[in-house]
Amino acid sequence: MTTAQPTPTTVRETTLRYLNSAITIGALLFWGIVLFWASSPGTLSRAQYAVVFLGSILVLYILNEAVGSIEAGDDLDLLILIACASVMIVACAYLFTNFEAVYQQRQGRALEHEYHLAWLVVAVILYLTWRSYGKIFLGLVVGAILYALYGWMLPGIFGHAGIDTRYMLQVLITDLGGFFGSLTQLTATLIAPFLLYAGLLFAYGAFDLILRVAIASSKYIESGVAQTAVLASAIIGSVNGSYAANAGMTGSFTIPTMIDSGLRPRTAAAIEGTASTSGQVLPPVMGASAFVMASFLQIAYVDVIAAGLLPAAILVASIVIGVHYTSIREVGSQDLQFDDLFDNRLTRGDKLVEGIRFGIPFVVLIALLGVLQWTVATSALWTIATMIGLGIATPVLQSIYAVATGRRSATVELDDRPSPRSPRLRSVRRSRIVDSLVTELGNTVAGFRRGAIILAPIAIILAAVNGIVDLLMVTGTPSKIALMLMDISGGVLFIAAILGMLVCIVMGIGMPTVAAYVITSTLVAPAFVNDFGVPELAAHYMVFYAAVMAGVTPPVAIAVVVAAGIAESNFWETCATAMTIAAPLFVLPLSFIYHPELVSTALGLQSLITAGAVLLGAVTIIYGLNYPFYFDRQYTIPIRFGLFWLGAFIMVYPALFAQVAGIAVFALVFIAEKYLSDSWTVPVGSELTR
């Protein structure tokens, strides 16, 4: 009697099932380590904990990527991933078990086999960097390594003596700086818990609720459908830390909806790209950059958030107004049907309960950080605990209430959902209350897994950036950039600020928010602080906002690329539309230089007055570039050009009297336009037309 041999399909399915189970179990163990360290930070030193953290999250990332390789039948890719996982397991296990010898006794030197192991780790990091972020960022990392090794070949100010390969490996690996350095430690201790919180929010349906609220708002404003994209993308983007990922995630929903409402594909893609980019600067997470900024400046995390409130308010108001003016020219019917977008409707009571379910953990976070002044790690730990407690308990209590009041049957059908194979367990699961409990426990596990998947690319990019920064610091690059800015600008702050912004935008191309901020804050911000006397917070917020704008700046404009791909629109036309919507945001970083009170940790009357003036300047730019003037082209172009520069003047000029005068000019133009468009009859030829 012959035994049936398993088919390749059966083997692949079995492998995938076991691999997915391994990822889930690994994610639970990984978060167990993270939360244990957050509750008992003295157990391991930060450097030793960073070794465990980076090794664990990279192995999880590799396992998750292996799922795709198996599904695609790409055996070569799978073998490379297995090799990468093996290297990281061996290397991190070696560094962890020999921590005292490597980190303390042999700091500045290493054994021969440790250098060989370091080369393998560098190769893995480069490969995973390419896999996560493509050729552009890989080129940046490789370029930094080559620059450190062969800087003697460069002429001029950026030339240096060069370093040997062993010293390079010490900087990157064996001294536990570089890839295992301060940014990786910061990710492990502060950023990781918040990304677990984000994973739980996704799993419990918080972002589904955000989309529902956003769609509901479309009934009350003419540009409501477009504003849905702004609200959803901004909120979600502030958490996930990548405008490209955010544009892909929310854009897959918002862009088709906007197109269905009458917007042209390029307009819909431009709105999504702009909203995804601008969301990266919103407190309290700021795409994870808030934690890094607090660490760099050695100030309280709450102070960083307080300093970012007024700029964020200006940014959001600018985007909302810009999107309104852009979309009202095209939008048609916006009678959105919830049944087409969601499986079920929520009653007003359901929305209230969901709001409480997700609102209380956020209130706990703000209270612990802002009122009680607890540490970020402890606050995040209690926020996560509150989120898990309410995430599980709320639906269970709702089920108990529904059964007790007779609103719903006490039993549910399990035919269309995963359930235990045992008849006895299936019988227990048929209870609505038990089913709710099991479902939310499953969602919690899914949230832990999703949190790890969200975290992994950020951990990779920050490890790579830490290596870049350490190499550039060894070569003295920050001081060289400061000398360059001083030399080209002739010591004129305005010219230096323009040049600095351009450098930040270039450095931010293709990078997630926090990575762009780290590089620009290391290389550019010190020049403004040390050579021009700009306050530290103002300089850091300037480079942060400027770097983020790379998301909508051609020729790369990653957020626009993703959004245009979804909308199937022309990239350059989409970029042009996005830049007209986001135009004030290219001027806003200069406002921080000339109006540092905008990013003050103490919000006072002067800060509010300045913010109001800068906002009106932003509105002037938006009105000039986006308002559908009812004039002939020969009049419209000069008006748009003049209003742009008037708005830029209002936003940047440091004297309040001059700002008020500029605002008065804008008010006159605004009133005159309304009078002319409402009162003049339709002329002929090249004259004004309504």
Image: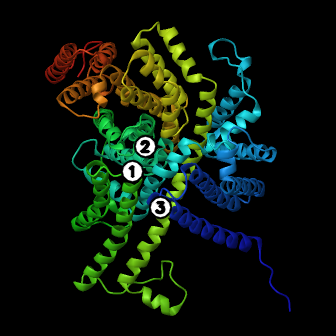
**Residue under label 1:** 376
Q: Viewed as shown, does residue 670 lie left or right of 563?
A: left
**Mark 3 residue crowding within 10 angstroms, few (<14) / some (14–19) / many (20+):** many
**How much space separates mark 2 and mark 3, taking CA atoms?**
17 Å
What residue is rendered at 67% in x and 17% in y? Answer: 159
Q: Residue 594's spot in the image, x, y percent?
A: 32, 19
The mark tally for this picture is: 3
Check contact, mark 3 vs mark 1: CB within 8 A.
Answer: no
Give the residue pinned by disc 2: 291
Q: Which residue is mark 3?
A: 35
Q: Give the mark nearest the N terminus, 1 or 2.
A: 2
Q: Secondary structure at mark 3?
A: helix
Type of amino acid at the residue the image marks with label 2: Phe
Q: Position of residue 656 (x, y in %)?
A: 20, 17
Label 1–label 2 contact, CB within 8 A: yes
How far apart in space, not on screen, are marks 1 and 2 (Cα)? Answer: 9 Å
Query: Residue 165, position in %: x, y?
Result: 76, 33
Name which quarter of the figure residue 478 lies in. top right
Quick one: which residue is furthest to the front in this view?
105
Residue 417 place in picture, x, y as percent: 48, 77
> Which quadrant would residue 657 be assigned to in this image?
top left
Circle nearer the N terminus (3, 1)? 3
Q: Is residue 289 visible?
A: yes
SS label for mark 2:
helix
State which tag comes first along the sequence, 2 or 3.
3
Q: Identify the image quadrant of the N terminus.
A: bottom right
Image quadrant containing the C terminus: top left
